[in-house]
Image: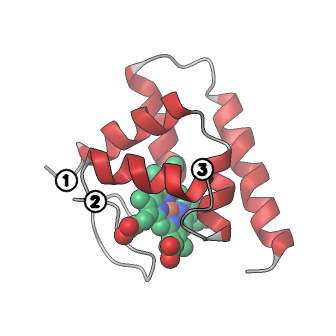
Amino acid sequence: MRPVVGFAIATGFVLLVSQSGAAAGADQGAQLAATCASCHRLDGGGTGIPSIIGLGEERLNSALLAYRAIERPNHIMHAIALSLSDEEIASVARYVAAQGK
Ligand code: HEC
């Protein structure tokens, strides 16, 4: 993926998140997960991008932290994780982990 594409995606993502910034608590995970769903299908179906359904809260949480810290290198997920606070990572992990149950 060319950097400019990644930047466009990251920028769009940040805009989406800031628009929903006023939404509180339980809704936050759902709002954030809606942005994940543009790449990861939340019904567990495969599109070439790995499914994030069934990974569990712990694994989702640590994967996002690893992408953010570039412990796990991936330009796309790094850009996404970089725009999330620890709290946002925790709430999106909790929400996504509860899907497909
Ligand atoms: C622009 C597309 C895109 C968006 C949006 C996106 N992802 Fe990803 N995600 C990917 C790609 C591509 C990979 C595979 C990266 C790799 O090979 O490490 C991935 C990998 C992952 C993985 C690792 C899966 C595994 O099997 O270990 C997790 C967890 C994940 N994403 C969570 C999320 C969450 C949560 C969001 C929303 C906050 C999100 N992603 C938004 C494209 C995206």
Position of residue 67 measured from the top left corner of the image (x, y, whole percent):
56, 59
The type of residue carrying mark 3 is Ala
In three-dimensional space, the C-alpha distance between marks 3 and 2, rounded to whole angstroms, equals: 17 Å
- In this figure, which residue is indicated by the disc labeled 3? 81
Asked if the residues shown at circle 1 and circle 2 are in contact, with their CB atoms under 8 angstroms apart, the answer is yes
Looking at the picture, which amino acid does disc 1 mark? Gly
Q: Is residue 26 left or right of residue 13?
A: left
Circle 1/circle 3 CB separation < 8 Å: no
- Residue 3 on image: x %, y %: 83, 72
Ranked by sequence position, the earlier of labels 3 and 2 is 2
Element type where label 3 sits in the image: helix
Give the spatial CA distance, label 1 vs label 3: 22 Å
Residue identifier under label 1: 100
Q: Amino acid at mark 2?
A: Ile
**Does residue 60 sit above or below 19 in this rendering?**
below
Residue at mark 2: 53
Q: Is the residue indicated by label 3 positioned so its CB lies within 8 Å of ligand 1?
A: yes
Q: Residue at image x 23%, y 42%?
A: 98
- Horizontal side of 80 relative to 51 (left or right) equals right
Residue occupying image coordinates x 43% and y 83%: 48
Label 3–label 2 contact, CB within 8 A: no
